[in-house]
Image (spheres, rainbow, N blue to C red):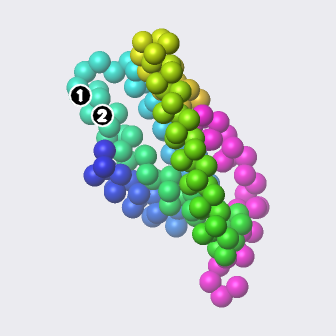
Amino acid sequence: MGVLNIGGTLMSGWACDRFGAKFPIAAYYLLRGVSLVVLPFFETTAALFTFAAVYGLNDISTLPATTSLTARVYGRYSVGELSGWIFFAHQIGSAVGSLLSGVFYERFGDYTLAFHSAAALAFVATALVLAIPDKTARAGALASAPGR
């Protein structure tokens, strides 16, 4: 997964530079959600490796897309501080998700509910990203364009 994170991140940066960040990040969250829905049903090593490959390409690919979308919406001069808050919130979500995954495992004997809960949050994230008005993303991109 770690090696594929590198490729996914580089491809994400390339996609965001060419297509904007909104649709790539929505696609990443959607793919993440779908992969987490099906993960509990994988029973073979080959299926697990397939999940690891898909998730590895997708996992860190959200970082350049999130940073790019933040710059496009809020302008490039706010990216540092806003990225700090975004990733702080991410760490809080990761801590809560880890805790709840353990609670779900203790209560239900497996991680299916944890995976499906994470998938549901990924689907919500997809919808929220798609709800960002295109004119806002374009205006932010114009405001942060070189020479402006």
Task: Describe residue 42's horizontal placement relative to residue 146 as left or right.
Answer: left
- Residue 40 point in image, percent of width and height: 40, 20
Magenta stretch?
121-148
Task: Say whether residue 125 is magenta.
Answer: yes
Q: CB under 8 Å between callouts 1 and 2?
A: yes
Is there any visible trace of residue 19 in the rendered image?
Answer: no
Which amino acid does the dot numbered 1 rest on? Ala
Quadrant of the rendering where the N terminus is positioned: top left
Q: Residue at x 46, y 30 (%)?
A: 36
Viewer-proximal residue, 69 or 99?
A: 99
Label 2: which secondary element: helix
The Cα–Cα distance between marks 1 and 2, rounded to whole angstroms, is 6 Å
The residue labelled by disc 2 is: 50
- Residue 44 point in image, percent of width and height: 25, 21
Q: Main secondary structure of the magenta part?
A: helix
- Dot 1 crowding, Cα within 10 Å, few <14, some 14–19, many 20+: few
Q: Residue at x 39, y 40 (%)?
A: 55
Question: In terms of image quadrants, where is residue 46?
Answer: top left
| Residue 89 to residue 74: above or below | above
| Residue 60 to residue 31: above or below | below
The residue labelled by disc 1 is: 46
- Residue 54 point in image, percent of width and height: 37, 40
- Residue 66 point in image, percent of width and height: 57, 57
Q: Residue at x 50, y 12 (%)?
A: 107
- Dot 2 crowding, Cα within 10 Å, few <14, some 14–19, many 20+: some
Task: Describe residue 43's horizontal placement relative to residue 111 as left or right.
Answer: left
Q: Residue at x 60, y 69 (%)?
A: 80
Numbered label attached to residue 108: none
Viewer-proximal residue, 92 or 148?
A: 92
Label 1: which secondary element: helix
Quadrant of the rendering where the C terminus is positioned: bottom right
